[in-house]
Structure formats: structure tokens, C-alpha cells
Image (tube, grey):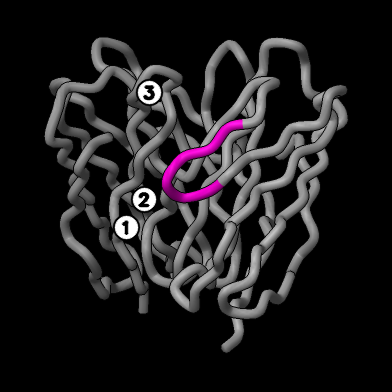
């Protein structure tokens, strides 16, 4: 398995600002993923962030709004830019690990935009 | 898009077995079935996965039909702490990213 931490655990931000979320893993992993979970909804994949390559974004998510960094095999950041109330969600990172790349999730970052 | 369908909700009595069904009729021969659960306000937790054989671990058992078009997750003795949303996922073989559907909200009642 993997132990994953996220910072911050929650934040309240003003409209038009940005928030950068950090994801730290206790071991080296190639595959990292970022998800969004809007209130009362399931998880939606934002992007896949593999070390050594540009992040791959899912339909409906763009790099200008959700820039991602992946500087090494244990760390990644997701920035949510130009915040609006519609960005209020839980943002989760996960890593693919294990023999069959089963995913392990961080605890999430709860973002509220006023 | 999720390739699975699950009932939106189920109830189970504490101490009884919880049987959560999942349909994945378009699964291909080399794609695995994964189960995760999300307890309120936490990140999803990996439970189990399988290809064609039944699987068991310390958390649950996974029964996959012979044609692989459906599966059942079994929690043998459900407790109140098993109340969660359970997700059945069949990721694409090539990229293995987990795409979550709506899941089944399991409520374990005393």
C-alpha cells in the first residue's frame, strides 16, 4: 500500500484567487492521479500526472485552470486557478501502486470558494 | 465513463452478510474488476480486485460470474463501520485509471 498526505486539508478562498494543493507519498510511484468530488457526487478524474511527462487532462479539464506539477516520484501539486464558487469541491490525489496498480487515495482537500 | 452499473442504495442488518452486485457486461477479457469504498468525509479505500477467479482477503470476498459480466462483493459480517459508498470499477486495460460511477450507498443498520 501507500501512505498519502495532502495539504491543506481544507481551505476557504475568495473568488478569483488560486489554491495549490500538495500531495506527498511515502514511497516512489510512477502514476499519480488527481480527482474532484463535487458535493454529493462521485469522483471525477481531472488528470493523470506521471513523473517525467506532461500531465494528461480529461475532457472538461484544462491546464490553464488546473496546472499540475510532478517534480519527483513522491510529490505532486494541483493548482485550482481563478476560483469561482463552482470550484467548491473535495480534491483528491491517488497513486497507482501494487502488483496490479490498485490505487490508494489521499484524505482529500476540501475547498470552499466564497 | 463508468463501465459498470450498481444499485444506488442497499440496507443491511448489522452482523449479516452484505452482498453488493455490479454489472459490467462490456468487460473485455483482460480487464480487472476493482472495488473501492468511501466512508463519509474520507478518501476512497481499496477493497479487492479480481479477473476471473473468486477472491478473498481480510476485508471482503469477490465473486465473479463465469461469463464475467457481473460480480458481487460480499462483506461477510457487516458492521456499522461498513456504512459507506461502494464503487465497482473496470478500468481500461491500457491506462488503468479508475473512473468512478455513482456507486452503491450501503447502510448497515443495528
Q: Is residue A97 above or below residue A67?
A: above
- Measured as percent of width and height from the top left, residue B34 is found at 58, 35
Disc 3: which residue = A55
Residue located at (75% from left, 39% from top): B71
Quadrant of the rendered structure where residue A32 is? top left
Residue located at (33% from left, 67% from top): A110
Front-most of residues A19 and B33: B33
Q: Secondary structure at mark 1?
A: loop
Magenta segment: B55-60
Residue located at (58% from left, 58% from top): B76
- The numbered mark 1 sits on a residue in which chain? A
Disc 1: which residue = A108
Work out which quarter of the rendered image holds the C terminus of chain B and state it.
bottom right
- The numbered mark 3 sits on a residue in which chain? A
Q: Is residue B3 above or below residue B26?
A: below
- Measured as percent of width and height from the top left, residue A73 is found at 17, 21
Front-most of residues A17 and B82: B82
Q: Is residue A7 magenta?
A: no
Mark 1 or 2 closer to N-term? Answer: 2
Give the CA separation, mark 1 to mark 2.
4 Å
- The numbered mark 2 sits on a residue in which chain? A
Contact (CB < 8 A) between labels 1 and 2?
Answer: yes
Please rate how many residues cluster around mark 3, counting C-alpha atoms within 10 Å: few if below 14, some from 14 to 19, many from 20.
some
Mark 3 or 1 closer to N-term? Answer: 3
Give the number of the mark in front: 3 or 2: 2
Disc 2: which residue = A92
Give the CA separation, mark 3 to mark 2.
16 Å
Q: Is residue A114 above or below residue A18?
A: below
- Measured as percent of width and height from the top left, residue A28 is found at 16, 22
Amino acid at each position: 500500500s501507500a501512505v498519502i498526505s495532502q495539504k491543506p486539508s481544507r481551505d476557504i478562498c475568495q473568488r478569483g484567487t488560486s489554491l495549490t494543493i500538495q500531495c506527498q507519498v511515502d514511497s516512489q510511484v510512477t502514476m499519480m492521479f488527481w480527482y474532484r468530488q463535487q458535493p454529493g457526487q462521485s469522483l471525477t478524474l481531472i488528470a493523470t500526472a506521471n513523473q517525467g511527462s506532461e500531465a494528461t487532462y480529461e475532457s472538461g479539464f484544462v491546464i490553464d485552470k488546473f496546472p499540475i506539477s510532478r517534480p519527483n516520484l513522491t510529490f505532486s501539486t494541483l493548482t485550482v486557478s481563478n476560483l469561482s464558487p463552482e470550484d467548491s469541491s473535495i480534491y483528491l490525489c491517488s497513486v497507482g501502486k501494487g502488483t496490479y496498480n490498485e490505487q490508494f487515495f489521499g484524505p482529500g482537500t476540501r475547498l470552499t470558494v466564497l | 465513463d463508468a463501465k459498470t452499473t450498481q444499485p444506488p442504495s442497499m440496507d443491511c442488518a448489522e452482523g449479516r452478510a452484505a452482498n453488493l452486485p455490479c454489472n459490467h457486461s462490456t468487460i473485455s477479457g483482460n480487464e480487472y474488476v476493482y472495488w473501492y469504498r468511501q466512508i463519509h468525509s474520507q478518501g476512497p479505500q481499496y477493497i479487492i480486485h479480481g479477473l476471473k477467479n473468486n477472491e478473498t482477503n481480510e476485508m471482503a470476498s469477490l465473486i465473479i460470474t463465469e461469463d464475467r459480466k457481473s460480480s458481487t462483493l460480499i462483506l461477510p459480517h457487516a458492521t456499522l463501520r461498513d456504512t459507506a459508498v461502494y464503487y465497482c470499477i473496470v478500468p481500461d486495460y491500457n491506462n488503468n485509471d479508475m473512473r468512478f460511477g455513482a456507486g452503491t450507498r450501503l447502510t448497515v443498520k443495528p
